[in-house]
Image (spheres, grey):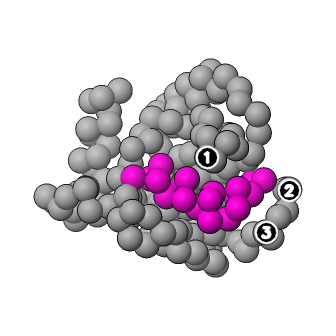
Amino acid sequence: MRALRRLHEAAVGLLLWRGGSSSLSRPAASEVLSQHLRQRGLPYWTSYCVKYSAVRNDQFGLSHFNWRVNGANYHILRTGCFPFIKYHCSRAAPQDLALQNAAFTALKVLNAGIPTLLYGIGSWFFVSVTETVHTSHGPVTIYFLNKEDEGAMY
C-alpha cells in the first residue's frame, strides 16, 4: 500500500504541477472533513468535493470508514475523482466497515480508476455551489453538485 500511495502522490503532484511545493502549507483532507461537519452543525448527511491541490491527502486508501467528530459518528464514502476528492458523509452508529472498505478499494484498483476520473471530470462541469471551510492552514473551498437543504435527513 505504501508503494501505491507514493506512486499516487507522485502522479497527482505531476498533474497539479506541484513539483517541490510543500504539502505542509495545506491542511489535511481529514481536517477539512471534520471542520466542514462542525461548521454545518453535525448534519445528518452531506456530500462534497475538495480539490486535491487544496489539501494533503492523509486518507489515501480509505474508501468507507467511520469518522468521529464532536461525539457524532459518520460513515464516510470517499474516493479520489481527479481533480477532486469526493466525500459522502452520513451520520450513523459505528460499524465494522473494514470489509466494505477493502471491497471498494479493490474495485477502484481493478478498474484502474477510470470511472472515478470520469466522475471527477463530470463534477468539474456540474459544480453549482461552493462553501468555505476554515482550517488551521487558512480557508479551503469545497464544492457541491447541488445545494443541500440544511437539517435535511436525506
Amino acid type at mark 1: Val
Of labels 1 and 2, earlier in sequence is 1
Residue 26, percent from left and from top: 32, 61
Q: Position of residue 90 (x, y in %)?
A: 73, 47
Quarter of the image for the C terminus: give it. Answer: bottom right
Residue 95: % across, % down: 71, 26
Q: Badge 1: few (under 14), some or many (20 or more) residues near its Cα, within 10 Å?
A: few
Q: How many marks?
A: 3
Q: Which residue is pictured at 29% across the width and 46% down the height?
A: 9
| Mark 1, residue position | 69
Pointer 2 residue = 153
Q: Is residue 77 visible?
A: no
Residue labelled with disc 3: 150
Q: Which residues are magenta?
A: 28-46
The quadrant in which residue 112 appears is top left
Q: Position of 18 compared to 88: left or right?
A: left
How many residues crowd around disc 2 within 10 Å: few (fewer than 14), some, or many (20 or more)? few
Q: Magenta includes 103? A: no
Secondary element type, mark 3: loop
User: Label 3 is placed on what type of residue?
Assistant: Glu
